[in-house]
Amino acid sequence: MSQKLNSFEIAQQQLRMAVDKLELDASVYEVLKNPKRSMTVVIPVRMDDGSTRVFTGYRVQHNDALGPAKGGVRFHQDVNLDEVKALATWMTFKCAVVGIPYGGGKGGVIVDPEELSRAELERLSRGYIQAIAPVIGPDKDIPAPDVNTNAQIMAWMMDEFSLIKQHNSFGVITGKPLIIGGSLGRTEATAQGVVYVTEDMTKAKNIELEKATVVIQGFGNVGSYAAKILFDKKAKIVALSDVKGGIYNPKGLNPYKVSEHVAATGSVVNYVGAKNITNGELLELECDVLIPAALENQITDQNVDNIKARIIVEGANGPTTPEADKILEQKGIPVVPDIVANAGGVTVSYFEWVQNNMGYYWSEEEVNNRLGQIMHTVFNRTYELYRSNKGINMRVAAYMLAVQRVAEGMQVRGWIGTALPKQKATRISAK
């Protein structure tokens, strides 16, 4: 089902809707509907048995009107160019809506990393950077972790770029280990941002978080940390899942113990004291808060009628299709969109880059306080615009704020002749 949906076309639809609502000149859409640069690379890797295997990789830079491109690199067997274009497009607007000085970028390699040894994974990571080195840099394009990549892979990538440039270049990559310029709070930053806006959304809907039932699809970096942080805040985590399936217990799950089970078995499935369910069944459970934190196109017109959550907070990129968005709005189920909800990761990546540039590093408390201020502010701006404009949902509101900012940046740089009518700019400005 989800494989038939083109994420890049969805991203273009979302952009078009915001441009139309803002009554922008057609040139804004024409500039933003396609990436500024899309790069396909071949990466020959020497395998442990002495053979050579060639991998395909991508790096896409969508727009850099407001600053250098920024976005993760995913290693996944289903990566394709349109997916990476979509993710880069979403990154442009994610950075814009939270107000950090970046444009959107994204990268990927077609590979199942579980099939590679550690040495092969290192050679692939370094080979990818060798291939894209001409188009990245601390002031050009700054990669970061994404699906199936982590701090160790970022360390190899940063080191390879530094070897090419013949000097340490910590600022070229974020999500690095602390010892080589990483930031405290970066690992759990996306999840922490999800929790901040979940607190805001539950408060807006008069849901008491300490009594709320929470369902989380995906138990990777985002889902697992979000589950633990919410569990510590006394929310009841009733269902969790990973790529192999899900588990459900209406009395609640302890995500710390689930993590121990995953470490021992490789999956949440068959956790003692919980019922095994499918990912599809998990999405349709009754709950106060549903957090899709896996991959794109999970809530579609095929299953949206069965969604019973009171609110949805998008931990993943693009988990809800435009058709499903419309039906959720009709059903009165608000969605905190991905470009707001999961912006914590890129925000703390920005903090890491700032710290690298000035050579001074913050405490974890300072990182989380700064993150909280930004996440609460962007939620309030988005929610205020949504509440004050009939006929739009929170996603359109977020895109209107983001596209306005990018359009104004392009206008003052002379990329386009006109951007936003003055009365429109005044109407949607943040308080």
Image (cartoon, rainbow, N blue to C red):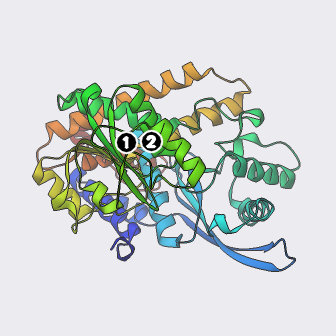
Mark 1: which amino acid?
Answer: Val
* The quadrant where residue 227 appears: top left
On screen, residue 44 versus residue 188, left or right, reads right
Q: Would residue 344 be seen by someone viewing this image from the given angle?
A: no
The answer for how far apart the CA atoms under marks 1 and 2 are is: 5 Å
Indicate the position of residue 148 as horizontal and vertical percent values. 59, 57
The part of the image, by quadrant, that contains residue 363 is top right
Which residue corresponds to the image point at 58% horizontal and 31% vertical from the top-left?
185
Which of the 4 quarters of the picture holds residue 125? bottom right
Q: Is residue 217 left or right of residue 47?
A: left
Is residue 210 toward the left or the right of residue 53 in the image?
Answer: left
Residue displayed at 35% across by 60% down: 279
Question: Is disc 1 placed on a helix, strand or loop?
Answer: helix
Sort mark 2 into few (<14), some (14-19) or many (20+) by Cα contacts within 10 Å. many
Give the camera-side residue of 33 and 71.
71
Q: Is residue 308 visible from the viewing direction of this image? A: yes
Label disc, if present, on residue 183 of the rendered structure: none
**Of residues 173 and 210, the one drawn nearer to the viewer in this rendering:** 210
Please report the residue visible at 20 percent of the width from the left and 60 percent of the height from the top: 304
According to the image, label 1 marks what residue?
A: 340
Q: Which type of secondary structure does the marked residue at label 2 adopt?
A: loop
**Residue 129 pos. (x, y %):** 74, 60
Along the line of sight, the residue nearer the viewer: 259 or 180: 259
The outermost residue toward the front is: 272
Q: Quadrant of the N terminus?
A: bottom left
CB atoms of marks 1 and 2 within 8 Å: yes
Where residue 405 sits in the image (x, y, percent)?
Answer: 39, 43
| Mark linked to residue 343 | 2
Left or right of residue 374: residue 250: left
